[in-house]
Amino acid sequence: MVSWQRRDPLGLQPTAKERNASMPPQEYVVVNRECEAVQIPEGTPALLSPGTRVRIMQSLGGSYTVVTERGYLLRIDETNADAIGKAPGTTHAILTAAGSLEDKVWALLKTCYDPEIPVNVVDLGLIYNCEVQDLPEGGHRVDIKMTLTAPGCG
């Protein structure tokens, strides 16, 4: 008889029980107000209605990735976090912190995550350059050289 079970003679891979033990419990919430979202990975704007039940898949950088009972995967940004009972604040904390504008831009870029893996675009190496210029009429211009993974990336 041929066994199709995957073998791990060195014992390096976690068992199914160990893998499941490390997974966080699933959190279900009900949307409490109309909420703008972005469908992943398409990047299509979506609108969640009050009373919609969603499961929070991940929360990174102040945004939340949720899945509806119909299987739609959506990203909710921090400005709408209160619609699912979460507190906004990451962006405000970064912008009001001490430091140069360039440091703040890099910090904000680190809050943008790939929706399929919990790694931000800076640590993924998708940002090649960030340059901040002062404008003569006041204000700043920020030029960022980067590559994209998908339109709906967090």
Image (spheres, helix red, strand yellow):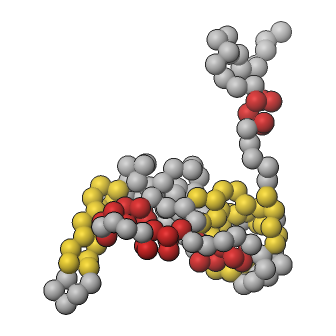
Q: Please state, as top left, top right, bottom left or bottom right, where the N terminus lies in the image.
A: top right
x and y percent of residue 136 in the render? 16, 86
| Front residue (pair 92, 27) | 92
x and y percent of residue 42 in the render? 56, 66
Residue 79 drawn above or below residue 125:
below
Residue lying farthest to the front in this orientation: 98
Residue 135 drawn above or below residue 133:
below
Residue lying farthest to the left in this orientation: 136
Q: Which residue is drawn at the image coordinates 28% and 62% (left, top)?
A: 130
Disc count in the image?
Answer: 0
Q: Which residue is drawn at the image coordinates 43% and 48% (left, top)?
A: 124
| Front residue (pair 135, 66) | 135
Residue lying farthest to the bottom in this orientation: 137
Quarter where residue 10 is shown: top right
Q: Is residue 141 left or right of residue 21?
A: left
x and y percent of residue 9 in the render? 67, 10
Q: Which residue is drawn at the image coordinates 80% and 30% (left, top)?
A: 17
Residue 139 drawn above or below residue 113:
below
Q: Which residue is drawn at the image coordinates 42% and 49% (left, top)?
A: 123
Quarter where residue 13 is shown: top right
Q: In this view, does 140 lie to the left or right of 30?
A: left
| Front residue (pair 65, 111) | 111
| Front residue (pair 109, 4) | 109
Residue 71 makes an appearance in the image: no
x and y percent of residue 4 in the render? 76, 19
Residue 81 makes an appearance in the image: yes
